[in-house]
Each structure stands twice: as structure tokens, then as C-alpha cells.
Amino acid sequence: MRHTAWYIIQAIMTTESLTITRPDDWHLHLRDGDVLNSVAPFTAKQFQRAIVMPNLKPAVTTVKQAVDYLDRVLAAVEGSDFEPLMTLYLTDNTSADEIVAAHKSCFIKGVKLYPAGATTNSDEGVTDIRRCDAVLEEMQRAGLPLLVHGEVTDGSVDVFDREKVFIDRVLIPTMERFPELKIVFEHITTADAVDFVTESGPRIGATITVHHLMYSRNAMFEGGIRPHHYCLPVLKRERHRQALLRAIASGKPGFFLGTDSAPHDKKLKESSCGCAGIFSAHAAIELYATVFDAIGELDKLEAFASFYGPDFYGLPRNSSTITLEKSEQTIPESYPMADGSVVPLMAGKTIPWTLKPDNA
Ligand code: DOR
Ligand code: ZN
């Protein structure tokens, strides 16, 4: 009896733990309806705030639609103090007046550029960024960031090169036309993007997903085709993953956390034409902690997850904290989602870090 108690005490005393300022997710897909209700609580238990993507069907293109969506998100996380930060979906027809209204609304924190056809629900996106010059002018004036899905859609460009080509064809010219416009280069995947963000001034930020930190493109073909490792921008070569790891290890403020957690029903992923998107919200901060720990940079996690995002957006840093413990957890094979299920990142696998429940 005495023995057992001693071992328990020793286990508690030796559990490595890490307390950090509560993080935010600067790129998240929450969807709508029953899916929203299924997935939003995962994010709310770890993160204080999240930038909520507007690629619903129909897309969230107006302030009116954004406020209605905000209400639905808040209903899905009732009982938590999670704060959704909303975005508008940029189209060829977005007006400068809508940007003025978005800025005044105070709850819209960015405008998302989806090149038309680039990814899930991007059909209503922008066909040519020059068509949006009046809108970009107003965003520049208002200090409202442009959040970019940085891939060209030109079918003649190899899928693996689309991010690099986007930098040259779209990003640089847009930055030249709007020298003060704040831009978040979302979910960067290449050494080219890391270098570009590193060399750009502080008005350019970049989010990095945990799946792009964990996997290279080999993961899509391990013993067969792996639809749950398919996302856009697609996973790249190992040398690009290494560049992303160097970016987070650099501790530079231009790089911050954005999961791009993008739930799709299992059946829609495991299909002859599977959807792009990886669901990571179930254990996002634990997975990031696992990556930072594996490269011996745990002390850089807090700034990446909790400081650099709000600093870029001009928002206050959070005041509460979360605690992570170095104790193993096994990720379920799937989670229920609406009337189906979603397969999470690392399904069936064990990871070394676990979020301590609030008040535990
Ligand atoms: O993999 C992705 N899934 N990339 C995106 O850009 C969109 C997202 C989604 O909405 O499913
Ligand atoms: Zn996304």
C-alpha cells in the first residue's frame, strides 16, 4: 500500500509539464450546421481565439453573413469563453464599402483571398487580384490584413510548384502596388515561402500548420494512397519540411500558429476524388508541442502559439494559461461528426503530450 502511494507521488512529481499563455489559432475551418457543432468544442478547449475561414457554401462575402455566422459559431461553443475572429471571403465583386463596414464591425479581422479554383469552396474566389485593387486600397487604409491562400491555379504549373509561382506572380506584384497592406501568407509549405517571409518586413506574416511540420509528401503514399494526408497546399519534399522546422526554431515573429484544421466527412476523404483537408483540431496544441519538443525547441512554442499572432494582428495577448503534460495519449481512429465521422491527424497513434483539462 505504502509502495503504491509512493509510486503515484513520484509519477506526479516527475511528470514534465509546460504552462504557456493560452494560444490562438490563426487559421481554422469550422464549417457550419451540425459539423460546426461537432468540431468547434475541440478548438474552444485549447484556444482562446481563432481566425475562422469564410469558405462556406455559400461563401461568407458580406458583413451581414459574417455576423450571422458568428452567432452560429458562438452557439456551437456555448459555455466557453472562446472568441471567434471572423473573416470575409474576397470575390471579384467585393466592394470597398463592404471593407469599410467590415472594419467598423470590429469582429472581422481579415479578408481571405482564395484564387478561384485553388481549393475547397473557392469557386467564388478571385479570378485576377487586380480586379480587387479598390478593395485592397481600402484594406490598406483600414489596416485590415489580407489572408492569402498562396497558390496559383494555372493548370500548366505543377501542383508542387504552385506556392513558389504564387510568390512571383501574385504576392510580390501585390505588395509593390500596396506597400502598406498587411498580408498573412497562410499555411506556408516551402523553403521559398520561408525565405520570402524572412526577408520581407513586419507587414508580412505566415501561418504554419502542424501537419506540414510533421509530414513530407511521402506520407501521402506510404504503402498506398493516404487520403487523410491530402491537403492543399499539398505536402512537399522533406527539404521543405526542414525549412519549416528551421522557421519555427528561428523564433522569428513572422511565423505563427495556424492549424488549417479542415474537417471533411470520412466518406468524402476516402473516395475516388477525395477532398483536401486535414483535421487536427482534436489535439492541435499537443501536436505542435510534440513537434517543438522533438526538435529541442519547446521554449519557442509559447511565442509561436500565443504571442506572434496577436502581435501581428494588433490584438492583446491572452492573459490566461494552459498546461501541457508530457503524458501519452492515444488518438481515436475517428470522431463522430454530424451524422458521419472525421478521421483526425495521427488517428490510432500515440503522442507524448496531453493538454491538462481546465481546473484539473
Ligand atoms: O486542405 C485544405 N482544406 N486546404 C484549403 O485551403 C481548404 C481546406 C478546406 O476548406 O477543406
Ligand atoms: Zn484553410
Image (cartoon, rainbow, N blue to C red):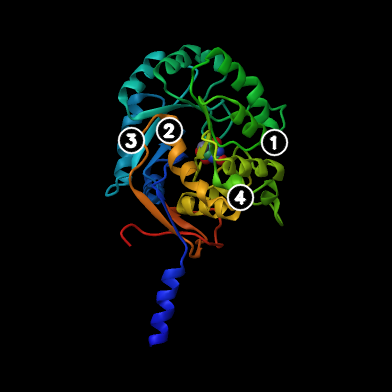
The quadrant in which the C terminus is found is bottom left
Q: Name which residue lies at 52% across and 46% down.
A: 300
Q: Earlier in the sequence, mark 4 or mark 2?
A: 4
For marks 3 and 1, give the CA distance: 35 Å
Residue pointed to by mark 1: 160
Residue at image coords 51%, 49%: 299
Which mark identifies residue 214?
4
Q: Position of residue 317 (x, y in %)?
A: 37, 38
Q: From the viewer's perspective, tell me whether residue 317 is left or right of residue 156.
A: left
Circle 2 sits on which residue?
311
Residue 247 higher or lower than 138, as above or below: below
Q: What's the amino acid at mark 1?
A: Phe
The residue that mark 3 highlights is 70
Q: Mark 1 or mark 3, which is nearer the start of the sequence?
A: 3
**How far is mark 1 from mark 4, CA to CA?**
18 Å
Q: Is residue 241 above or below residue 123?
A: below
Find residue 226 and report its horizontal and vertical position in percent.
64, 52
Indicate which disc, 3 or 2, sits on the residue closer to the N terminus: 3
Residue farthest toward the bottom in the current orientation of the protein: 1
- Ranked by sequence position, the earlier of labels 1 and 4 is 1
Along the line of sight, the residue nearer the viewer: 98 or 93: 98
Marks 1 and 4: CB-CB under 8 Å? no
Label 4, label 2: how many angstroms apart (C-alpha)? Answer: 26 Å
